[in-house]
Amino acid sequence: MNAEIIYRYFPNLTDVQLQQFAALGELYRDWNTKINVISRKDIDQLYEHHVLHSLAIAKIINFRPGTSILDFGTGGGFPGVPLSILFPECQFKLIDGTGKKIRVAQEVCDAIGLKNCAPTHLRGEDEKDKYDFIVSRAVMPLPDLVKLMRKNISKTSSNALPNGILCLKGGNLQAELQPYHKIVETNEISQFFKEEWFKEKFVIYLPL
């Protein structure tokens, strides 16, 4: 599968963005043979299962220029790298506690000339800076994520949505979301992307 699936859902990309998305397939395939950041059986579905999945967050919010976003537990760069391509005027920091995964994310950023993305070998407990939004992809249960990352949410909001957490999750989330049932928003990704794989997958938004 190639980058065409991205262009289908995001038709207004610049030439630079088109080139950057197109380059991801070969880069991740090459790096994955050296450092395993994507399961072997999943690498052929990189654009659907990883790149497009990451971009589901962009169907919930259009980050304004200058927005700062922390990708917690980024692994090899998801959702941070695709979002950094889509929002070149925003600043992204990608952190992960596994150094070799961060190396892959950094090498990919360097190869495509991504200047607004800073992969950093760091645990969430040790992150001190403030951000408008925390993004993550199935890193840990939401209550644990909130407990760990609440300290990193800036008090000043400048986007259409108040500052908070945006995370990609799947399956039955009822128990996990129960503590926040009055304020959490659960968005089905299948309303944005028609591929079968996106059924029972969600973007969870929690204002903090």
Image (cartoon, helix red, strand yellow):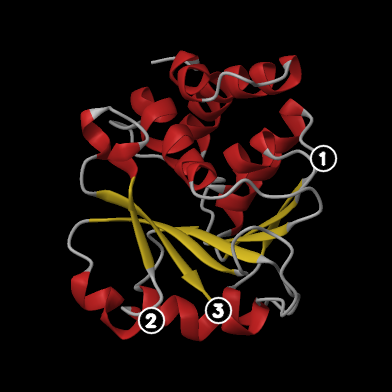
Residue picked out by circle 1: 115
Task: Say what secondary structure mark 3 lies in.
Answer: loop
Q: Of helix, strand and loop, which one carries label 1?
A: loop
Q: How far apart are labels 1 and 3 at the CA level?
A: 28 Å
The reply to whether discs 1 and 2 touch (Cβ–Cβ < 8 Å) is: no
Q: Kindly identify the residue that appears in the image at 28 percent across and 28 percent down.
A: 194
- 5 lies left or right of 97: left
Residue at x 68%, y 59% (from the top left corner): 159
CA neighbours of label 1 inside 10 A, class few (<14), some (14 to 19), many (20+): some
What label does residue 208 carry, if any?
Answer: 3
Determine contact: label 1, label 3, CB under 8 Å.
Answer: no
Residue 95, horizontal then vertical, whole percent: 62, 61
The answer to whether one can see residue 97 in this image is yes
Give the amino acid at mark 3. Answer: Leu
Q: Does label 3 or label 2 sit earlier along the sequence?
A: 2
Residue 16 image offset from top left, x and y in percent: 75, 19
32 left or right, relative to 133: left
Mark 1 or mark 3, whichever is nearer to me: 3
Secondary element at image label 2? helix
Q: Quadrant of the N terminus?
A: top left
Pointer 2 residue: 143
Q: Residue at x 27, y 75 (%)?
A: 176
**Residue 59 on image: x %, y %:** 49, 42
| Kind of residue at badge 1 | Lys
